[in-house]
Amino acid sequence: MSSYASQTVTQLKDILKSRGLPINGVKADLIVRLEESDQIDAELDDEEDTAITTTTTTAPVEAETAKEEESAPATTTTEEHKEESVAAPVAETDKAADESKTTESVEPEAPATTTQEPKKTITLEELKAAAIDFLTKKIARAKKFGNESELPGLEGSLKRIEKFGISFESSLAKELGYGTVETKEKFVRKPGHFKNKNKNKNRNNRR
């Protein structure tokens, strides 16, 4: 530190600049500033040396502790393995006894009988009402969940069914599960229809 006194003001300012310290003041101020900087650097070096020494001292202790912890589970595992090996024959004996009891108590099951569900019957009016109810619910659901793109098609189908009805061959009837049901309303010509028609033709020919 005393070497600073033998240096010129210009040299002292260069040293201060290299350390990022202010360069204002007379030579004595510059020397004091450099000495304070040296003292701070020395204290920082001492703290670093102390930290390194502490780390080096604690490392072997931590290593020994880790070894002890690793050896402890190994001993426990060996003891558990012995207990399992002793209990295994007992468990197998109990299992064999349970299986023999189960085999004796099991009785042959009766063959399952399959029953056919009766076919549904529905009129065109009932099918129309079911379709309107189905489409109304779908429209409400689409509005609730914001599916605006589905609304035009659903509303158009609803108006068409309300006005013209619905047939059993339509895709909506099949979707409702009535596409292949037996219907109450069948368009059958009345008995004697063709006979009456032929009689009318004969009368017209005679005239």
Image (spheres, grey):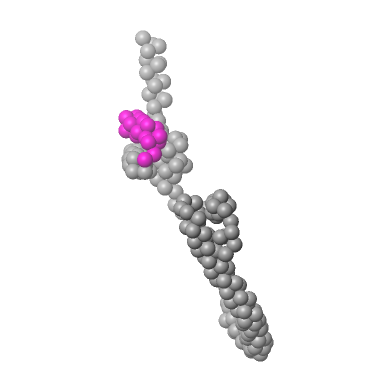
| Percent position of residue 121, x then y | 40, 45
Is residue 183 visible in the rendered image? The answer is yes
Identify the residue at image location x=33%, y=31%.
159
Query: In which quadrant is the C terminus drawn?
Result: top left
Q: Position of residue 86 (x, y in %)?
A: 66, 90
Q: In this view, does 34 lie to the left or right of 133?
A: right
Residue 190 in which image quadrant: top left
Please tell me whether residue 65 belongs to the stretch shown in magenta: no
What is the span of residues highlighted in magenta in the rendered image? 146-165
Q: Main secondary structure of the magenta part?
A: helix
Front residue of this view, candidates 34 and 179: 34
Residue in the picture at 46% in, 51% down: 24
Front residue (pair 72, 191): 72
Q: Is residue 73 visible?
A: no
| Above or below, comparing residue 133 to residue 95 in the picture | above
Report the residue at 46% width, 37% height from top: 171
